[in-house]
Image (tube, rainbow, N blue to C red):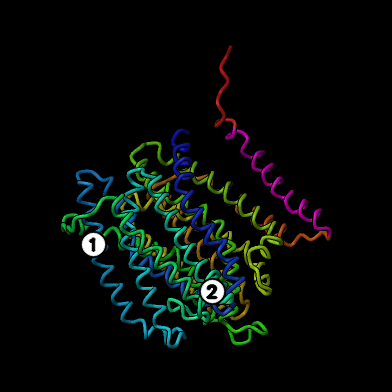
Amino acid sequence: MSNLKKLAGQTAVYGLSSILGRSINFLMIIVYTEYLSKEAMGSFTSIYALIGFLNIVFTYGMETTFFRFSTGKNLDPKKVYNSTQSLLVTSTLVLGSGLFLLAPWLAEWLDYPGQAYLFRWTALILSFDAILAIPFAKLRLENKALIFAGAKIFNIFLNIFFNLLLIIVFPYLITKGIISEGFLGYRSDWGVEYILLSNLLANGLIIPLVWWKAGFFKFQLEGAIVKPMWAYSIPLLFMGLAGVTNELLSRFLFEYVLPPNFYAGLSAREAGGIFGANFKLAILMNLVIQAFKYAAEPFFFKQSTDKNSPQLYAKVMHVFILFCTLLMIAISVNLDWLGPFFLRQSGYGAGLFIVPTLLMGYLLLGVYFNLSIWFKITDQTKYSFWITLVGAALTVAVIFIFVPIWGYMGGALSTIICYFVMCLLCYLYGQKYYPIPYQTARGLFYLLISFVVSYLGFYLELGDPIINFLAKNSLIIFYLGLIFLLEKDQIKSYLPKRKKL
């Protein structure tokens, strides 16, 4: 129980930066949907899906590799840090330069004629993210959670500052005649450009701070360290791609797969903006998963030598499912007012019905992260390649088959189908090579009943707003009561025992 408390505490600290960052990113949707066009939102959705996908390629599993080798026996942690960072900086120079040079071709191919600068900025954003990955991982490994959170929060507020300055403040000053249209090269016809530029400036400005706090590295590539690290990380690259393939590829491909005039009065890019904006509403689930991941990954590795670690991993999984299913219901039943509050312009509400499906998809991604610990701690990362390959194939197939038929829901379904199959495969292989006593039947029950309750609450309509609100949210109480009824013995075991008089 003390280990679970420790993990919960670390999750809370890491979650401060992760949840704050993603929450503010989530809140920025209010600004974007208020001040930018649906076409600009479509561009934002597509380009940031590409960034998320390529970010995995640029880091290729090196964070997890760094944790594994830094906690391994007979290895100098300083040499591991130097080698990992040196390898990542070298590969970033190659990948970043290549993407920078290919920018004009990408702009034409992705239907952004004359906007090659968007993809040059993308190359720089990806490069800055990559060279910060290992220093941030080192702070996590050394339990410098406050420094980690502080740097992340500083980056967040820089990003917000530049976004608000460029999207709201400058246009206001121009309309008031305080500054002219061309002030510092400002262009009022830009939209997604200012989102990218804000991200670029914020990331670039924190590099010296993070490198200083984590410790500057010495360029060092020792074959004895780099070679096994490379072999360990490459399968993780494919596992990482699995984590973003469904979530991001669906958003990236949506506008290119959707038939012309599928939604009356909307271009494919505008429909992609609506799809992407509703995807953002489901990010509340991903906030929890990301915070959990930051704390759980080093925690899992450190606990791997304990003989009771399988039982601990099973408990962590069960608590994770309980909490996340409750969160899914809480969001879903309140979408009737959450949607209009965050998605400001008319038209975005047409995609709200896919949000519970997307929430379940994110939840299954979190389940997969829990399940995947078996091949990380047994050095069997090769299995991630095959599991990922199946998941990626399913994602692409579902998108191409169902988006032209069902539009928004076709894109959302790829989330559940992909991650459920990946979870199933990971569970079956894991129980064979590293058995963990998961409460499988009960976990599946909670997933199913919470999904049904989520859609029941979403579609429930009783007329009077107050009665409707109370009725919808009573489903949260119902689910809490069900958890208490089924888990009362476990809950009692967590409570402190009374001392006998």
Q: Which amino acid type is shown beneath numbered disc 2?
A: Ile
Amino acid on which disc 1 is placed:
Leu
Q: Which is nearer the eye, 61 or 487?
A: 61
Name the image quarter holding residue 32.
Answer: bottom right
**Residue drawn 69% across and 55% down?**
453
Let me know if residue 182 appears in the view: yes
What stretch of residues is rendered in magenta? 464-491
Q: Position of residue 87 (x, y in %)?
A: 23, 62
Residue at image coords 55%, 61%? 26
Mark 2 or mark 1: which comes first in sequence?
1
195 or 142: nearer the viewer: 195
* Dominant secondary structure of the residues highlighted in magenta in the image: helix
Residue 326, position as x, y percentages in the image: 62, 49
399 with respect to 109 (left or right): right
Identity of the residue drawn at 79% across and 61% down: 461
In terms of image quadrants, where is residue 62?
Answer: bottom left
Q: Which mark is residue 87?
A: 1
User: Which residue in the protein does label 2 denote?
Assistant: 178
Whether 466 is among the magenta residues is: yes
Q: Position of residue 368 (x, y in %)?
A: 47, 56
